[in-house]
Amino acid sequence: TASRTVKLEIPQDAELVSVRAFPKLEHSLNFEDSLDLQPLMRGTKLEWTAPEGFWSVVAVYALPKGFNPMHPTSGARAIERLYAPFETHCADELGQTLAIFFQDELDFGNRMPRWSPEVLAEFKTRKGYDLKPELAALWFDLGARTTKIRIDYADVVTQLVEDRYFKPVFNWHEQHGTLFGHDNFGR
């Protein structure tokens, strides 16, 4: 196809994580010949003239909303707001009358793929490679590495949520002789 200009704008309150152009293959996007377009961003806008051929431009950005269970203090914050008041106001009942805490439809206010500002650094530390250039693999087929990237991403995010939210909350309940249960959002 003839060269053409691509114009893209992300929301004002978004955190731009990555923007790349991928040549289209028959059933996937070509990562090896992809181009980093992030240096061409001007604020929230991108204007880029695509070379000959078929291209897909993928912008990955995060919108801050909901509770971030990957934040380093997320578990401590949940304890402070949800469970510590019971310790303050009815400590003698914890583990006795108040034996079980149950969260129905546990929903942090965001959906997969979850994002947090520290994901890229944690991913590099835990998996040994840079996720940023291949982020589009969370939504698009980038070829042979797509499955590995998705599994590695899910592993890192799950570890972060477990370490930063669920373990502190579990430990608080363990220390107070209470059980903690929850039902995941949706079925």
Image (spheres, rainbow, N blue to C red):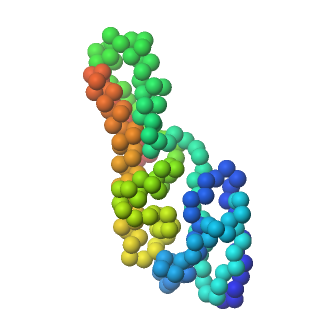
Can you give x and y, in whole percent of width and height, for residue 121 in the image? Answer: 45, 55
- The part of the image, by quadrant, that contains residue 97 is top left
Q: Is residue 45 left or right of residue 72?
A: right
Q: Residue 112's x, y, as percent?
A: 47, 53
State the residue at coordinates (45%, 63%): 131
Residue occupying image coordinates x 36% and y 26%: 101
Question: Is 157 or 119 nearer to us in this picture?
Answer: 119
Left or right of 104, for residue 109: right
Q: Quick check: 54 above or below 69?
A: below
How many numbered circles does the render carry? 0
- Residue 139 seen from this side: no
Measured from the top left, where is residue 102 in percent x and y?
A: 37, 30
Q: Nearer the viewer, residue 94 or 162?
A: 162
Where 23 falls versus 155 (above or below)? below
- In the image, residue 70 sits, relative to residue 150, either above or below, namely above
Confirm whether residue 147 shows in the render: yes
In the picture, measured across the screen, residue 63 lies left or right of residue 138, that is right
Q: Quadrant of residue 46?
A: bottom right
Q: Residue at x 36, y 32 (%)?
A: 169
Residue at image location 40% in from the left, 38% down from the top:
165
Q: Answer above or below: position of 151 versus 84.
A: below
Q: Quadrant of the N terminus?
A: bottom right
